[in-house]
Amino acid sequence: MPWWAGAFLYVLAVVVRLGFFAAEEDHARFVGIPTPAAALVWSTVLIGSPSAPSAAAVFLSCAAAMVWPVAIPRPRGVGLAAFACWAVGLVIWHLAA
């Protein structure tokens, strides 16, 4: 599968997640990983300049994880701070590269 097909399926999963799972009533947990967390995963992987098949695999894995019906507790306290630091660190890393 070409990398662009993986990227297309990732975008499709984002649309499905934002459209369907945003209507959920349970605010104590996520169903599947949230879109920003998936973006942090693949942007972390892309720092290493993976091959096209590896990048497609990451896109597909993140897409599946976003729509997989598994309950994930929302981060609070230290977990939320770590998530924010991860995002800030990635922005700095990508700007410096």
Image (cartoon, rainbow, N blue to C red):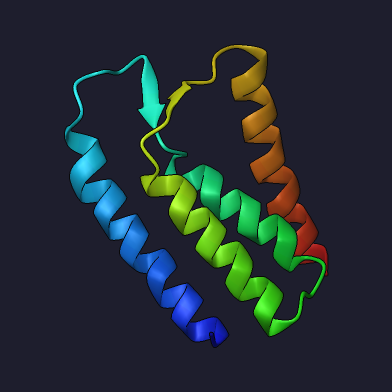
Q: Is residue 43 left or right of residue 60?
A: right
Query: Which residue is depicted at the point 36% across and 47% down?
Result: 67
Task: Where is residue 73? Give x, y as percent.
Answer: 47, 19
30 shown above or below 35: above
30 shown above or below 46: above
Query: Which residue is depicted at the point 72% across and 52% down?
Result: 90
Q: Is residue 37 left or right of residue 86?
A: left
Query: Which residue is depicted at the point 72% across and 56% down?
Result: 44
| Quadrant of res 59 | bottom right
Task: Where is residue 14? Give x, y as percent.
Answer: 35, 57
Number of marks present in the image shown: 0
12 shown above or below 50: above
Nearer to the camera, 51 or 35: 51
Which residue is outermost to the bottom?
Answer: 2
Task: Where is residue 49? Give x, y as percent.
Answer: 79, 75
| Quadrant of res 97 | bottom right
Query: Which residue is depicted at the point 47% across and 39% down?
Result: 33
